[in-house]
Image: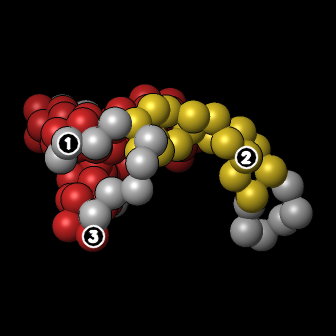
Amino acid sequence: MRIRIFVLALLTFVAAFGAHEVMHLVVIFAVGGRGSIIVRPWRLGLVDFQIPSLHAQPVEPLGLVQQALVNFLGPALAAVPLVALWAGVRETAPRLALWANVL
């Protein structure tokens, strides 16, 4: 069961991470900015290794309030469908995998 939870959580993470960055981009446009999703290297903290990663980036710098909204609402809006799905699932393994991605 642990392996099943891990695999489900990993697969859910890929979709949730994409949704997270798309929601950042949606909020960038909602606060009046322009932006794009880019692929950039992400350096891992425990080992000296980089992996490609998605990142929503505004074209021009945002103001403090706009940036705060982007930083908060991107993850919050991306979590809403996961929480709704979590609330509707009754089986333990998918429920734990979804909860791991919401936290």
Numbered circle sitting on residue 41? 2
Image height of 31 relative to 65, above or below: above
User: Tag 3, which secondary structure?
Assistant: helix
Q: Residue at 85% of width from left, 55% of height from top? A: 49
Mark 1 surroundings within 10 Å by alpha-carbon count, few (fewer than 14), some (14 through 19), many (20 or more): few
Q: Residue 32 carries which label?
A: 1
**In the image shown, does 93 or 16 lie closer to the viewer?**
16
Q: Quadrant of residue 44?
A: bottom right
Q: How far apart are marks 2 and 1 (CA)?
A: 27 Å
Q: Is residue 57 depicted above or below 85 in this figure?
A: below
User: At numbered mark 1, what does the secondary structure look like: helix, strand or loop?
Assistant: loop
Dot 2 falls on a residue whose secondary structure is: strand
CB within 8 Å, label 2 to label 1: no
Position in image of residue 97 (x %, y %): 39, 43
Q: Is there CB contact under 8 Å for labels 1 and 3?
A: no
Residue farthest to the right?
48
Q: Mark 3 points at which residue?
A: 64
Three-letter amino acid code of the residue under disc 1 = Gly
> What amino acid does circle 2 point to?
Pro
Q: Earlier in the sequence, mark 2 or mark 1?
A: 1
Q: How many numbered dots are placed on residues in this image?
A: 3
Quarter of the image with the C terminus is bottom left
